[in-house]
Amino acid sequence: MIPAPRPARDSLARVARDVAACERCPRLRAWCALVARTKVRRYQGQEYWGRPVPGFGDAAARLLVVGLAPAAHGGNRTGRVFTGDRSGDFLFAALFRAGFANQPTSVARGDGLALRESYITAVVKSAPPDNKPLPDEILNCREYLAREWALLPRVRAVLALGRIGLEGFTALLRERGRLPPRGRLAFGHGVSHDLGGGVRLFCSFHPSQQNTFTGKLTAADLDRVLGAVKRHLDSVD
C-alpha cells in the first residue's frame, strides 16, 4: 500500500499564497473586484491587486501588529496591508520612529520597506464595504491569523489597532485556550494585558483618518504605546 503523502510544512509564504487565493467570502470578493475595476480618479492609471491581502514582515518578529482589514484603495490596490493610504502613512511613520521599520513610508510593494522584528496583519484579509466586516467574515479569516500567530514563535508583544483588532485576536486566543471562554478584555488607547509566557497585549486607537484627522489619535499618542511595547520587549530579552 502506498503511504499517504505527508502534509507540507506550513510557512508564512504558504499562508500568504493561501490568503491571496481565498474565496471564502463572496460578498468581500465581489466588493474588492468591483473596487479594482472602477477605481477612483487619482488611481485610474494603476492596476489594483483586488484580492485578499496577506500579512507581511520579519519572520523573527517580536512584535505582532493586528489591524482591522485592508483599505479599499490602500491594501486592496497595492497588495500590501496598510500600504498606499493615510492610515499606513501614520502607522509606518510611528514604526520607523520606534525602530520597527527601516523607512517611514509604505507606498507600494517593492518600495524598499523592511520591517524589523515586527510583523503586520489584519483580522480580515479583504477590504470590506464601509470598513465593516460581518461576523462570519471575521470568522472565515481566523484560520489565517491563527497560522500566522503559530509561525511567529518569538512574538512577545501584540499591538491591537482598534476594538475589532483586539476582539478578533482575543477570539483566536480563546479558541487556543489562552484566555477564558467568556468575557472581554478592556479596550482603550494605551491599555495593556498580560497574556502569560512573557507575552503582553497592547491596545491603540486605529490610525484611521477618522481618528487621526480629528486628533483622537496623535503621533505622540502612538509613540507612547510603541514606547511601552519597546520597554516590555527589553524586559523579556
Image (tube, rainbow, N blue to C red):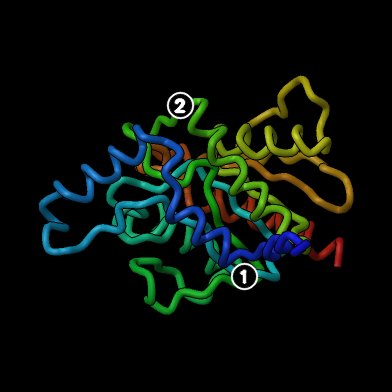
Residue at 45% x, 69% y is 104
Residue 75 is situated, as x and y percent measured from the top left of the image, at 37, 54
**Which badge, 1 or 2, comes first in the chain's sequence?**
1
Q: Is residue 177 left or right of residue 217?
A: right
Vertical relation: 232 (above or below) 22? below
Image mark for residue 58: 1
Left or right, 120 with respect to 200, comes to left
Quadrant showing the N terminus: bottom right
Tally of marks: 2
Q: Position of residue 103 (x, y in %)?
A: 47, 74
The residue drawn where x is 53% and y is 63% is 56
SS under mark 2: loop
What's the residue at 74%, 64% (across, down)?
2
Q: Residue furthest bottom?
A: 112
Per the image, the residue denoted by label 2 is 134
Residue 20 placed where, x, y %? 43, 56
The label shown at residue 9 is: none
Q: Amino acid at mark 2?
A: Leu
Amino acid, disc 1 = Asp
